[in-house]
Amino acid sequence: MSTDSPWTRTLAGRPAPGRRAERSRTTTMRDVEMFTEMTGDKNPVHYDVELATASPFGGLIVQGGVTTGLMNAVVAEDLPGPGTVFLETNWRFVKAVRVGETITASVKVEHVRDDKPICKLETVVRNASGEDCVVGTAITYTMPLSRREARQATRAVPR
């Protein structure tokens, strides 16, 4: 890779194919409520305990956006890293995530372009039993950011 590669202007640099990153968290009813606040998704399988328990899910489940939302943190914070956004996602939801379950979102770099800071990632979200919940791929773009811009952006995030 030459020194004029667009990857040299990104904070984390060019990721190596095969590299992996992951993040875990336990889902909560507050996640469901916050997602509803943002989107208006009030599906009863997220709120009605009796209905959800009688459904094939066997209990309350979190919205799919809660499940895949953890993937945003992995790509933006860990791999490829700061400044990264999704250009495309191709996800299959293969198992619902129950409220209270711990999930782990993982990415693996499949391909890295040299001409642009673009990656193809293998993506998966698994529950604590290791069962796949969401599987697929994503294409990401990593914006060139200076260290100063990144520090300013971090300070601007409400805590």
Image (cartoon, grey):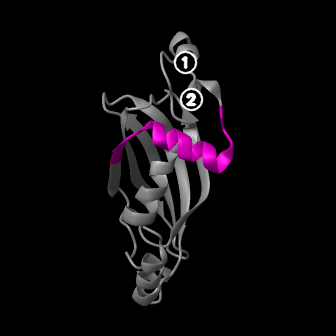
Query: Looking at numbered disc 1 in the image, what kind of residue is underneath it?
Result: Ala
Tell me the residue that label 1 is attached to: 52
Judge by depth and name the residue closer to the eye, 22 or 158.
158
With respect to residue 43, does 55 lie above or below?
A: above
Tell me the residue that label 2 is attached to: 46
Residue 79 lies, in percent from the top left, at: 39, 62
With respect to residue 125, does 147 lie above or below?
A: below
* Residue 74 visible (yes or no): yes
Question: Which corner quadrant holds the N terminus?
Answer: bottom left
| Structural crowding at the residue carrying mark 2, measured as other residues with C-alpha within 10 Å and reported as few (<14), some (14–19) or many (≥20) | many
| Structural crowding at the residue carrying mark 1, measured as other residues with C-alpha within 10 Å and reported as few (<14), some (14–19) or many (≥20) | some
Residue 5 lies, in percent from the top left, at: 47, 83
Name the residue at 37% across, 75% down: 12
Q: Which residues are magenta?
A: 24-42
Mark 2 and mark 1 lie on one chain; the one further toward the N terminus is: 2
Question: Which corner quadrant holds the C terminus?
Answer: bottom left
Which label is found at residue 2? none
Name the residue at 51% across, 34% down: 62
Side of 128 where 148 appears, left or right: right
With respect to residue 148, does 27 lie above or below?
A: above
Residue 38 lies, in percent from the top left, at: 63, 50
Name the residue at 48% across, 43% down: 31
**Contact, mark 2 vs mark 1 (Cβ under 8 Å):** yes
Residue 157 lies, in percent from the top left, at: 47, 72
Judge by depth and name the residue closer to the eye, 40 or 19.
40
Judge by depth and name the residue closer to the eye, 80 or 150.
150
Name the residue at 48% across, 83% down: 145
Queried whether the magenta region covers residue 126, the answer comes back as no
Query: Looking at numbered disc 2 in the image, what kind of residue is underneath it?
Result: His
Separation (CA) of disc 2 from disc 1 = 7 Å
